[in-house]
Image (cartoon, rainbow, N blue to C red):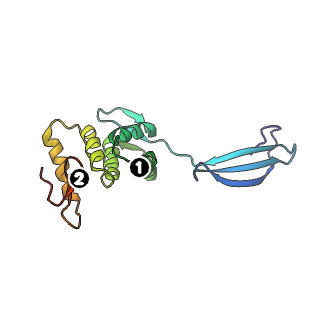
Amino acid sequence: MQCPFCQHANNRVLESRSAESGRSIRRRRECLKCHSRFTTYERIEYVPITVIKRNGDRELFNRSKLLRGIARACEKTGLEANRLETIVDNIEADLQQRTIREIASADIGELVLQQLQPLSEVAYVRFASVYRQFTGIRDFADALNHLQATDTPSSPETYTAKGHRNGSALTV
């Protein structure tokens, strides 16, 4: 590591600590020649991920675009912003662990739906309606039936349109 003041290559680390919520390491250094102090950060270098869109276009994975889409689906559902960030973190980590650097947008959409399903049925259906390009009420009914089939509560308990619990089964 070169000193930013005198360009000398030798320095010593005075202090190291975690930074950016554990995503980097902050190191305080001192140049052995001019004794100036400076700070460096070590971060994981992510390999860029390319998203293949439905129409065949390719674009770089955009974390903020994904977060915006999820936030729109989760409006007025009570899910906190940090929970949405965690969803995006999980998806991004999953994508980074893959050996293939080109991912279909459909695969990313499925990852989002997997994350949303246990958190909010409303957000799940909203996201699915855009991602899967629902064209009519049948598409919504199919999504609701899928949710009902995958939700196996210990007792048959569902929610009415106003969100109140009742003891009867959900009919679509």
Q: Is residue 2 left or right of residue 96?
A: right
- Name the mark on residue 50: none
Q: CA distance from mark 1 to mark 2?
A: 27 Å
**Can residue 98 be spotted in the picture?**
no
Q: Residue 101: x and y, percent?
A: 43, 45
Label 1 residue SS:
helix
Question: Alpha-carbon neighbours of circle 2 within 10 Å: few (<14), some, or many (≥20)?
Answer: few
Residue at the image point whose x is 50% and y is 44% from the top: 47
Whether the residues at callouts 1 and 2 have beta carbons within 8 Å, the answer is no
Label 2 residue SS:
loop
In the current view of this chain or complex, which residue is farthest to the right?
34
The answer to whether 11 is drawn above or below residue 72 in the figure is: below
Residue at the image point whose x is 23% and y is 59% from the top: 151
| Residue type beneath disc 2 | His
Q: Is residue 44 left or right of residue 151?
A: right
Q: Residue 36: x and y, percent?
A: 83, 43
- Sequence-wise, which precedes: disc 1 or disc 2? 1
Q: Is residue 118 left or right of residue 29?
A: left
Question: Alpha-carbon neighbours of circle 1 within 10 Å: few (<14), some, or many (≥20)?
Answer: many
| Residue type beneath disc 1 | Ile
Circle 1 or circle 2, nearest the eye: 2
Q: Residue 86: x and y, percent?
A: 44, 50
Residue linked to disc 1: 87
Q: Is residue 105 left or right of residue 139?
A: right
Residue at the image point whose x is 35% and y is 32% from the top: 57
- Name the mark on residue 164: 2
Residue at the image point whose x is 40% and y is 37% from the top: 68
Q: Residue 16: x and y, percent?
A: 71, 54
**Can residue 46 be spotted in the picture?**
yes
Front-most of 74 and 85? 74
In the current view of this chain or complex, which residue is farthest to the bottom?
154
